[in-house]
Image (cartoon, grey):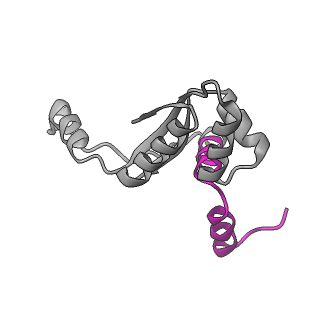
Amino acid sequence: MAKLSTEELLEAFSELSLIELSEFVKAFEEKFEVTAAAPVAAAGAAPAAAAAEAEEEQSEFDVVLEAAGDKKIGVIKEVRALTSLGLKEAKDLVDSAPKAVLEGVNKETADKAKETLEGAGATVTLK
């Protein structure tokens, strides 16, 4: 296998959707038995206070498809438009609900995606 440069890897990753990139990170973590999570701060911070502060300042949201509803085809079309997934990948995502459609997006993008998916007949939550 040819060794890829850092630039080539970055270019390849920039072409992936958020869901594809998330799946890659999970596979990478499993293969090399590592975690990509940020290290936890040393003792001294109160966990309850930190959790409350994180909720108040939440700037990234996950759009989670809970159910496709009666208009599954319309929901698949909207998922494709939001994620740039192919038809099969979008169908698989909708079939495997509850599943995250978008991860780590800002509040405005999450609200628009939720409104669009609910307009197509899906049940959606923001986390």
Q: Position of residue 81 (x, y in %)?
A: 63, 52
Of residue 3 and residue 52, the one placed in the foreground of this image is 52
- Image quarter in which the N terminus is found: bottom right
Q: Position of residue 22 (x, y in %)?
A: 58, 46
Q: Main secondary structure of the magenta part?
A: helix
* Residue 107 appears left or right of 69: left
Q: Is residue 112 above or below residue 122?
A: below
* Residue 42 appears left or right of 126: left
Q: Position of residue 39 (x, y in %)?
A: 36, 46
* Residue 95 appears left or right of 98: right
- Image quarter in which the C terminus is found: top left
* Residue at 79 percent of width and 41 percent of height: 88
Residue 44 lies within the magenta run? no
Q: Is residue 27 above or below residue 122?
A: below
Where on the picture, by quarter, is residue 11? bottom right
Of residue 91 and residue 24, the one placed in the foreground of this image is 91
* Residue at 50 percent of width and 43 percent of height: 35
Outermost residue, right side: 1
In magenta, the rendered stretch is: 1-28
Q: Position of residue 36 (x, y in %)?
A: 49, 47
Please give the count of numbered marks on the rendered protein.
0
Residue 2 lies within the magenta run? yes
Q: Is residue 16 above or below residue 96?
A: below
Where on the picture, by quarter, is residue 17? bottom right
